[in-house]
Amino acid sequence: MKQSRSLNFALALYVALIFVFVFAPIVFSMIFSFNSQRFPTIPLGEFTTEWYAKILADPDVWEAALNSLIVSCSTAVIATFLGFSTAYSDFRYGFRFKGPYLALILLPPTIPLIIMALAMLAWFSKIGMSGQLYSIIIAHSVLTAPFAMAVIRLRLNQMDPDLEAAAWNLGGSEWQTMRHVIVPFCKPAIFSSLFLTAAVSFDEFAVSWFVSGLNKTLPVVVLEIVQGNIDPQVNAIGTFVFLISMTLVVLAQLFFASRQMKSTQS
Protein backbone atom coordinates (compact mmCIF):
# COMPACT_ATOMS: atom_id res chain seq x y z
CA MET A 1 0.00 0.00 0.00
CA LYS A 2 2.80 2.41 0.93
CA GLN A 3 4.64 1.59 -2.29
CA SER A 4 1.45 2.21 -4.28
CA ARG A 5 0.99 5.63 -2.66
CA SER A 6 4.59 6.54 -3.41
CA LEU A 7 4.14 5.52 -7.04
CA ASN A 8 0.92 7.54 -7.33
CA PHE A 9 2.65 10.55 -5.78
CA ALA A 10 5.59 10.22 -8.17
CA LEU A 11 3.25 9.98 -11.17
CA ALA A 12 1.23 12.98 -9.98
CA LEU A 13 4.41 14.99 -9.52
CA TYR A 14 5.64 13.97 -12.97
CA VAL A 15 2.36 15.07 -14.59
CA ALA A 16 2.43 18.35 -12.65
CA LEU A 17 5.99 19.06 -13.84
CA ILE A 18 4.94 18.39 -17.44
CA PHE A 19 2.06 20.85 -17.11
CA VAL A 20 4.39 23.46 -15.62
CA PHE A 21 6.91 22.91 -18.40
CA VAL A 22 4.24 23.28 -21.09
CA PHE A 23 2.11 26.08 -19.69
CA ALA A 24 4.61 28.25 -17.78
CA PRO A 25 5.85 30.09 -20.92
CA ILE A 26 2.24 30.69 -21.98
CA VAL A 27 1.29 32.04 -18.56
CA PHE A 28 4.30 34.38 -18.52
CA SER A 29 3.44 35.54 -22.04
CA MET A 30 -0.06 36.42 -20.86
CA ILE A 31 1.36 38.28 -17.85
CA PHE A 32 3.81 40.24 -20.02
CA SER A 33 0.97 41.24 -22.33
CA PHE A 34 -0.24 43.51 -19.50
CA ASN A 35 3.26 44.82 -18.72
CA SER A 36 3.99 48.46 -19.53
CA GLN A 37 7.66 47.74 -20.27
CA ARG A 38 8.58 46.91 -23.84
CA PHE A 39 10.97 44.11 -22.89
CA PRO A 40 9.79 41.03 -20.93
CA THR A 41 11.82 41.56 -17.78
CA ILE A 42 11.30 41.12 -14.06
CA PRO A 43 10.42 43.12 -12.00
CA LEU A 44 7.36 44.01 -14.04
CA GLY A 45 6.36 47.54 -14.88
CA GLU A 46 2.91 49.00 -14.44
CA PHE A 47 -0.30 47.27 -15.47
CA THR A 48 -1.44 48.37 -18.93
CA THR A 49 -3.77 47.38 -21.76
CA GLU A 50 -1.81 49.45 -24.28
CA TRP A 51 -0.69 46.45 -26.33
CA TYR A 52 -4.24 45.15 -26.63
CA ALA A 53 -5.43 48.59 -27.74
CA LYS A 54 -2.73 48.64 -30.42
CA ILE A 55 -3.60 45.26 -31.91
CA LEU A 56 -7.32 46.08 -31.84
CA ALA A 57 -6.57 49.27 -33.79
CA ASP A 58 -4.35 47.49 -36.32
CA PRO A 59 -6.23 46.66 -39.57
CA ASP A 60 -3.63 44.04 -40.50
CA VAL A 61 -4.37 42.12 -37.31
CA TRP A 62 -8.12 42.27 -37.97
CA GLU A 63 -7.59 41.02 -41.53
CA ALA A 64 -5.38 38.19 -40.27
CA ALA A 65 -7.97 37.31 -37.61
CA LEU A 66 -10.71 37.16 -40.25
CA ASN A 67 -8.50 34.97 -42.45
CA SER A 68 -7.81 32.66 -39.50
CA LEU A 69 -11.53 32.43 -38.74
CA ILE A 70 -12.42 31.61 -42.36
CA VAL A 71 -9.62 29.07 -42.67
CA SER A 72 -10.31 27.32 -39.36
CA CYS A 73 -14.08 27.08 -39.91
CA SER A 74 -13.71 25.87 -43.50
CA THR A 75 -11.00 23.41 -42.51
CA ALA A 76 -13.12 22.05 -39.66
CA VAL A 77 -16.06 21.31 -41.97
CA ILE A 78 -13.97 19.77 -44.77
CA ALA A 79 -11.68 17.77 -42.45
CA THR A 80 -14.61 16.45 -40.42
CA PHE A 81 -16.45 15.38 -43.58
CA LEU A 82 -13.34 13.61 -44.87
CA GLY A 83 -12.67 12.10 -41.46
CA PHE A 84 -16.24 10.84 -41.11
CA SER A 85 -16.23 9.34 -44.61
CA THR A 86 -12.91 7.60 -43.97
CA ALA A 87 -13.88 6.36 -40.52
CA TYR A 88 -17.18 4.99 -41.79
CA SER A 89 -15.55 3.25 -44.75
CA ASP A 90 -13.10 1.65 -42.32
CA PHE A 91 -15.92 0.61 -39.99
CA ARG A 92 -18.38 -0.54 -42.63
CA TYR A 93 -16.34 -2.15 -45.39
CA GLY A 94 -13.59 -4.71 -45.70
CA PHE A 95 -11.55 -4.50 -48.85
CA ARG A 96 -8.17 -5.36 -50.27
CA PHE A 97 -5.25 -3.16 -49.25
CA LYS A 98 -7.28 -1.68 -46.41
CA GLY A 99 -4.19 -1.53 -44.18
CA PRO A 100 -2.10 0.56 -46.62
CA TYR A 101 -5.17 2.70 -47.29
CA LEU A 102 -5.54 3.58 -43.61
CA ALA A 103 -1.79 4.05 -43.20
CA LEU A 104 -1.77 6.52 -46.08
CA ILE A 105 -4.68 8.47 -44.59
CA LEU A 106 -2.99 8.69 -41.19
CA LEU A 107 0.36 9.70 -42.70
CA PRO A 108 0.15 13.56 -42.84
CA PRO A 109 0.50 14.21 -39.06
CA THR A 110 3.66 12.08 -39.01
CA ILE A 111 5.40 14.18 -41.68
CA PRO A 112 7.49 17.13 -40.36
CA LEU A 113 5.55 20.34 -40.91
CA ILE A 114 8.40 21.98 -42.84
CA ILE A 115 8.49 19.07 -45.28
CA MET A 116 4.70 19.19 -45.60
CA ALA A 117 4.80 22.95 -46.14
CA LEU A 118 7.47 22.73 -48.85
CA ALA A 119 5.58 19.94 -50.60
CA MET A 120 2.34 21.92 -50.50
CA LEU A 121 4.09 25.04 -51.79
CA ALA A 122 5.65 23.12 -54.70
CA TRP A 123 2.36 21.45 -55.58
CA PHE A 124 0.27 24.63 -55.40
CA SER A 125 2.85 26.55 -57.43
CA LYS A 126 2.81 23.85 -60.11
CA ILE A 127 -0.97 24.01 -60.54
CA GLY A 128 -1.22 27.81 -60.11
CA MET A 129 -2.98 27.84 -56.73
CA SER A 130 -0.28 29.24 -54.45
CA GLY A 131 -0.83 32.33 -52.35
CA GLN A 132 -4.61 31.96 -52.04
CA LEU A 133 -6.78 31.63 -48.96
CA TYR A 134 -8.25 28.38 -50.24
CA SER A 135 -4.69 27.04 -50.55
CA ILE A 136 -4.36 27.27 -46.76
CA ILE A 137 -7.77 25.61 -46.33
CA ILE A 138 -6.78 22.68 -48.56
CA ALA A 139 -3.42 22.26 -46.84
CA HIS A 140 -4.97 22.41 -43.36
CA SER A 141 -7.69 19.95 -44.38
CA VAL A 142 -5.06 17.44 -45.45
CA LEU A 143 -3.22 17.99 -42.17
CA THR A 144 -6.24 17.74 -39.84
CA ALA A 145 -8.46 15.13 -41.53
CA PRO A 146 -6.59 12.24 -39.80
CA PHE A 147 -7.44 13.77 -36.40
CA ALA A 148 -11.11 13.87 -37.36
CA MET A 149 -10.95 10.29 -38.62
CA ALA A 150 -9.38 9.07 -35.37
CA VAL A 151 -11.99 10.79 -33.17
CA ILE A 152 -14.97 9.57 -35.19
CA ARG A 153 -13.56 6.05 -35.53
CA LEU A 154 -13.32 5.81 -31.74
CA ARG A 155 -17.01 6.60 -31.55
CA LEU A 156 -17.95 4.11 -34.27
CA ASN A 157 -16.06 1.39 -32.38
CA GLN A 158 -18.69 1.72 -29.65
CA MET A 159 -21.60 1.03 -32.01
CA ASP A 160 -23.14 -2.42 -32.36
CA PRO A 161 -22.32 -3.63 -35.90
CA ASP A 162 -25.82 -5.19 -36.10
CA LEU A 163 -27.51 -1.81 -35.62
CA GLU A 164 -27.31 -0.98 -39.32
CA ALA A 165 -28.67 -4.38 -40.33
CA ALA A 166 -31.57 -3.91 -37.92
CA ALA A 167 -32.41 -0.55 -39.53
CA TRP A 168 -32.31 -2.13 -43.00
CA ASN A 169 -34.58 -4.98 -41.87
CA LEU A 170 -37.08 -2.40 -40.63
CA GLY A 171 -37.29 -0.92 -44.13
CA GLY A 172 -34.69 1.84 -43.99
CA SER A 173 -32.50 2.49 -47.00
CA GLU A 174 -28.74 2.95 -46.65
CA TRP A 175 -29.11 6.74 -46.79
CA GLN A 176 -31.96 6.72 -44.26
CA THR A 177 -29.89 4.54 -41.96
CA MET A 178 -26.97 6.92 -42.35
CA ARG A 179 -29.16 9.94 -41.56
CA HIS A 180 -31.21 8.52 -38.69
CA VAL A 181 -28.81 6.00 -37.10
CA ILE A 182 -25.14 6.52 -37.96
CA VAL A 183 -24.95 10.32 -37.93
CA PRO A 184 -26.95 10.77 -34.67
CA PHE A 185 -24.81 8.12 -33.01
CA CYS A 186 -21.64 9.90 -34.15
CA LYS A 187 -22.91 13.41 -33.41
CA PRO A 188 -20.77 13.98 -30.25
CA ALA A 189 -17.65 12.82 -32.11
CA ILE A 190 -18.56 14.98 -35.12
CA PHE A 191 -18.86 18.10 -32.96
CA SER A 192 -15.69 17.14 -31.11
CA SER A 193 -13.91 16.74 -34.45
CA LEU A 194 -15.16 20.13 -35.65
CA PHE A 195 -13.76 21.91 -32.60
CA LEU A 196 -10.51 19.94 -32.54
CA THR A 197 -9.68 20.46 -36.22
CA ALA A 198 -10.63 24.14 -35.97
CA ALA A 199 -8.22 24.53 -33.04
CA VAL A 200 -5.38 22.79 -34.89
CA SER A 201 -5.98 24.91 -37.99
CA PHE A 202 -6.23 28.15 -35.99
CA ASP A 203 -2.86 27.48 -34.33
CA GLU A 204 -0.93 26.19 -37.35
CA PHE A 205 1.68 28.56 -38.81
CA ALA A 206 4.39 26.59 -40.66
CA VAL A 207 2.23 25.42 -43.56
CA SER A 208 0.29 28.69 -43.52
CA TRP A 209 3.47 30.74 -43.78
CA PHE A 210 4.62 28.85 -46.87
CA VAL A 211 1.34 28.76 -48.82
CA SER A 212 -0.51 31.89 -47.64
CA GLY A 213 1.19 34.53 -49.79
CA LEU A 214 -0.41 37.85 -48.86
CA ASN A 215 -3.35 36.16 -47.12
CA LYS A 216 -1.81 35.99 -43.67
CA THR A 217 -3.32 34.26 -40.67
CA LEU A 218 -2.77 35.33 -37.05
CA PRO A 219 0.10 32.88 -36.36
CA VAL A 220 1.86 34.10 -39.52
CA VAL A 221 1.50 37.72 -38.37
CA VAL A 222 2.98 36.77 -34.99
CA LEU A 223 5.92 35.05 -36.70
CA GLU A 224 6.63 38.09 -38.86
CA ILE A 225 6.51 40.43 -35.86
CA VAL A 226 8.91 38.20 -33.91
CA GLN A 227 11.33 38.10 -36.84
CA GLY A 228 11.45 41.88 -36.96
CA ASN A 229 12.01 42.92 -33.34
CA ILE A 230 10.78 42.41 -29.79
CA ASP A 231 7.22 43.72 -29.72
CA PRO A 232 4.87 43.23 -26.73
CA GLN A 233 1.97 43.08 -29.18
CA VAL A 234 3.03 39.49 -29.83
CA ASN A 235 2.11 38.59 -26.25
CA ALA A 236 -1.32 40.16 -26.67
CA ILE A 237 -2.01 38.39 -29.97
CA GLY A 238 -0.65 35.14 -28.54
CA THR A 239 -3.02 35.43 -25.59
CA PHE A 240 -6.00 35.76 -27.91
CA VAL A 241 -4.88 32.80 -30.02
CA PHE A 242 -4.23 30.65 -26.95
CA LEU A 243 -7.61 31.41 -25.37
CA ILE A 244 -9.49 30.69 -28.59
CA SER A 245 -7.58 27.46 -29.20
CA MET A 246 -8.00 26.25 -25.63
CA THR A 247 -11.72 27.04 -25.75
CA LEU A 248 -12.10 24.93 -28.89
CA VAL A 249 -10.09 22.06 -27.41
CA VAL A 250 -12.09 22.13 -24.16
CA LEU A 251 -15.37 22.12 -26.11
CA ALA A 252 -14.11 19.16 -28.15
CA GLN A 253 -13.29 17.27 -24.95
CA LEU A 254 -16.63 18.15 -23.36
CA PHE A 255 -18.65 16.90 -26.33
CA PHE A 256 -16.73 13.64 -26.51
CA ALA A 257 -16.52 13.04 -22.75
CA SER A 258 -20.20 13.85 -22.13
CA ARG A 259 -21.30 11.09 -24.47
CA GLN A 260 -18.77 8.70 -22.95
CA MET A 261 -20.22 9.36 -19.50
CA LYS A 262 -23.78 8.84 -20.75
CA SER A 263 -22.78 5.54 -22.36
CA THR A 264 -21.11 4.39 -19.14
CA GLN A 265 -24.12 5.33 -17.00
CA SER A 266 -26.55 3.59 -19.32
Image (tube, rainbow, N blue to C red):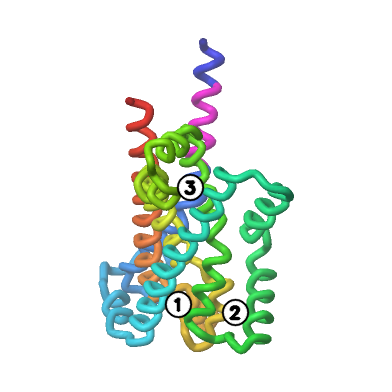
Left or right: residue 27 versus residue 145 is left
Q: Look at the image and say whether residue 150 sits in the magenta stretch.
A: no
Residue of label 1: 217
Q: Tell which of 70 and 171 is nearer to you.
A: 171
Q: Relative to 59, is 89 above or below?
A: above
Q: Look at the image and say whether residue 11 sits in the magenta stretch.
A: yes
Left or right: residue 252 versus residue 148 is left
Q: Tell which of 48 and 246 is nearer to you.
A: 246
Q: Secondary structure at mark 2?
A: helix
Which of the two labelled residues, at mark 3 and mark 2, occupies the earlier sequence position? 3
Using the image, tell me which numbered label, if any, was put on residue 152.
3
Label 3, label 2: how far apart the Cα atoms are: 30 Å
Label 3, label 1: how far apart the Cα atoms are: 28 Å
Magenta region: which residues? 7-17
Q: Residues within 10 Å of mark 3 (few under 14, many from 20)?
A: many
Q: Tell which of 11 and 66 is nearer to you.
A: 66
Residue of label 2: 210
Q: Residue at x 68, y 81 (%)?
A: 122
**Contact between labelled residues 2 and 1, with CB atoms less than 8 Å apart:** no
| Kind of residue indicated by mark 1 | Thr
Closer to viewer: mark 3 or mark 2: 3
Q: Residues within 10 Å of mark 1 (few under 14, many from 20)?
A: many
Q: Quadrant of residue 262?
A: top left
Label 1, label 2: how far apart the Cα atoms are: 11 Å
